[in-house]
Amino acid sequence: MPESLAKSTPLRAGVILFPGFQALDVFGPLDCLNVLSRNHDMTLAIISSTLEPVSTESPGFPNAISQSVVPTHTFATAPALDLLLVPGGLGTRSTNPVIEEAISFIRDVYPQLSHLITVCTGSGLAARAGVLDGKRATSNKLVWAEITAMSTSVDWVPHARWVVDGNVWTSSGVSAGIDVTLAWIEKTFGSEEASRIANRIEYIRHEDPSDDPFAKMYGL
Amino acid sequence: MPESLAKSTPLRAGVILFPGFQALDVFGPLDCLNVLSRNHDMTLAIISSTLEPVSTESPGFPNAISQSVVPTHTFATAPALDLLLVPGGLGTRSTNPVIEEAISFIRDVYPQLSHLITVCTGSGLAARAGVLDGKRATSNKLVWAEITAMSTSVDWVPHARWVVDGNVWTSSGVSAGIDVTLAWIEKTFGSEEASRIANRIEYIRHEDPSDDPFAKMYGL
């Protein structure tokens, strides 16, 4: 077993949900972890403000379609975690109090984590929690200016599919969450396991973290 | 508006859920449709046997991690649909009675549909419903033999990221659901809209339906 996991088996993973999360930010990474968990001992806590299902319905789009996912824990009842996944979505920039609760949770739990993965504008929540201070990090490219303005203490990297700084893995927008998760699995469980999962989900990986056509597309 | 949609506005979409569905089979396509629905009038019915949340927990892997999604309708209460999305997953080959109900639903609803999209082993359910009879279709490549054995009346196409035959769009495994959905959006709403959505989710599309390295990888 890789040294980074030796201190905790099973691997205790958690994901934060808030109203207006982006569905693929959550389920790209989780689909990879679901397949991983068929081979490795893992738990998953799905964490939000209450145990009520959490909707992808996004502020500003009340007539758009949406889906709801069931939490397993609240911010108050979340178990000890090794890995925390923070998705993005339009909800990250809402005034819903769940967002402030999520930011407080990230700030409080970060010291106990072995690994933090953010997807898309989820890095904005981590930045507001202060856990990216002094670290290199990336985010969604379309709303780059809005997210990077949330903290001047982060070394924001515009041209990146994902960025690793210590135990913090931040990805670019939405589908980049699949690549950062497979890269994290490769580092943590080995390249064979990452390839097995990518092939199982018939996903053609982007294995170069600097492979980012969207930075240029959005003028960064 | 494209002629194919003229007969129904809003576009009435539906997705089937069953225990052991593959998360990304559902949320790759739905994330694309969620973004589409911010620009286009749509409804979404999330359909299963009951209104209880449906889990990704898969037969044979009781200790793997899972997530649960909330249906909006049952097979008995589902509204009229223009588009039906059928995901795959290990649950498709279970003996859970929900699978037989799902197959019956596909058989019954198909004549009213304008479009059917299947992802991964979801084509096995469509094949068992008989709606792929005489049609070209594809499926997951790892379990190709098992799925194609479900119907000898289908013209199974092994080397394909996705296949279109009339109003039936079938994709290869898991992440191929994103490509087939974006291809369907391109055909239905135009290439600019498909590009807008792909760029919004920072997804590098596979635009050639014959671009399928996994067929060769799995010896097909």
Image (cartoon, coloured by chain):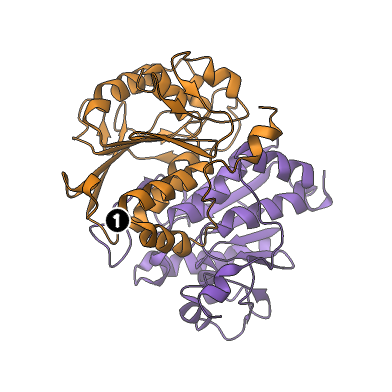
Chain colours: A orange, B purple
For the residue pair B74 and B17, the one nearer the viewer reads as B17
Q: Quick check: can you spot residue B53?
A: no
Q: Residues within 10 Å of mark 1 (few under 14, many from 20)?
A: many
Q: Name the residue at 66% across, 27% down.
A: A220
Can you give x and y, in whole percent of width and height, for residue A178 in the image?
Answer: 48, 47
Quarter-wise, where is residue A218 in the image?
top right
Seen in the image, is A78 located left or right of residue A70? left
Is B214 placed above or below B207 here? below
Is B26 placed above or below A154 here? below
Q: Name the residue at 57% across, 28% down.
A: A158
Q: Name the residue at 27% across, 27% down.
A: A110
Q: Name the residue at 53% across, 28% down.
A: A157
For the residue pair B3 and A85, the one nearer the viewer reads as A85
Pointer 1 residue: A37
In this figure, what is the number of numbered marks? Answer: 1
Seen in the image, is A70 located left or right of residue B103? left
Is B171 placed above or below A1 here? below
Quarter of the figure with the N terminus of chain B: top right
Seen in the image, is A189 located left or right of residue B123? left
Q: Chain of mark 1?
A: A
Can you give x and y, in whole percent of width and height, for residue A136 in the image?
Answer: 45, 27
Q: Quick check: can you spot residue A68?
A: yes
Is B172 placed above or below B15 here? below
Could you say whether the residue bearing mark 1 is in a helix, strand or loop?
loop
Can you give x and y, in whole percent of width and height, for residue B38 in the image?
Answer: 65, 33
